[in-house]
Image (cartoon, rainbow, N blue to C red):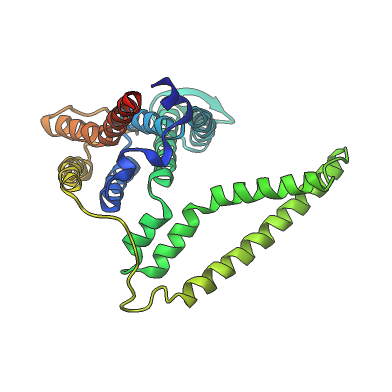
Amino acid sequence: MKEMFKNGIGEDAEFAGYHPVVNFIFFVFAIGITMFSIDPVFLVVTLSFSWAWSILLNGKKAVRFNLLMTIPVMIVMAVINTLFTHNGATVLFYLNYNRVTLEAFVYGLAAAVMISSVIIWFTCFNKVMTSDKFIYLFGKAAPVLGLTLSMIFRFIPLLKSRYNEISMGQKCMGRHVEKGIFAKARQLIKEASILVSWSLEASIETSDSMEARGYGLHGRSSFHLFKFTSRDKKLTAYILVTGIIASVGCALGKTSIYYYPVIDLGNWDLMKMITLISYILLLVAPLVIDVLGEKKWQAYRSEI
């Protein structure tokens, strides 16, 4: 179990083994509802589950990324919103005759938590939704869109891999022996230039290769191993029920509160409680599935 949280389970996650439609529907609900939630309780829920799942998928390195993503965004947005938004009834102090209010500060923090949660959810999305899943989902209906999205989501890890390869090649050629800021900057610019040229050439080659293979032509079929099984049907029904209930509550404003002129947390009526419970049940599903799936495989390995 410690090894699982140390290195992460990545694409071997049990939830990632479900049908691409199931994965995509979950992320649509999870990210979509998060984008329209500003209530502190819902923000804490989505931030907690996004953090937990990202650490499970990516291991310890996710902690550093999440901290670097969450803390600076919170500080910057809280400061900017406080300095440039003067609404609110609770005045903390005056800065150049401008009011600095508690409501503006709290709203900036809430907006930062919401944005950070969305970004962390997208890191999980990038790990689960691989390029072959995108091609399967959008290859027939929108082949250009499917190929574009597939290339976009693999672009950053591909660039990192290529840059490491370029840097290693330059070191082997003795290009990193020079010292000084200007020498290092010159070497960095050279490596970046190589990376851009390589990426552009690879993009052209990919485009020509896909065109030569008839990608996007009417009636063209593609090979895939995805089958919509009974377990996919059950999980899809579960996600749809919890997601739709949470979405209805979000549309009715149950995931939002008023920050101006004073912070009003609103009334916790029955619909808001149902929305929160449905939202928690939705977000906890992949986490539980992956933990149980990893335990099952560990027990299987121990028996061999």
Residue 283 seen by the camera:
yes
Judge by depth and name the residue closer to the eye, 28 or 211: 211
Q: Residue at x 34, y 30 (%)?
A: 49
Q: Residue at x 59, y 31 (%)?
A: 96
Judge by depth and name the residue closer to the eye, 96 or 293: 293
Where is residue 190? Give x, y as percent.
78, 53
Determine whether 288 is above or below 172 in the image: above
Which quarter of the figure is the N terminus placed in? top left
Determine whether 133 is above or below 141 in the image: above
Quadrant of the image occupied by residue 296: top left
Where is residue 204? Give x, y as percent.
58, 70
Residue 261 seen by the camera:
no
Which quarter of the figure is the C terminus placed in? top left
Where is residue 104? Give x, y as percent.
43, 32
Position of 88 with respect to 230 (left or right) is right
Judge by depth and name the residue closer to the eye, 129 or 17: 17
Position of 228 with respect to 287 (left or right) is left
Q: How many marks?
A: 0
Position of 173 with respect to 67 (left or right) is right
Q: Residue farthest to the bottom?
A: 218
Q: Residue farthest to the left?
A: 270
Quadrant of the image occupied by residue 297: top left
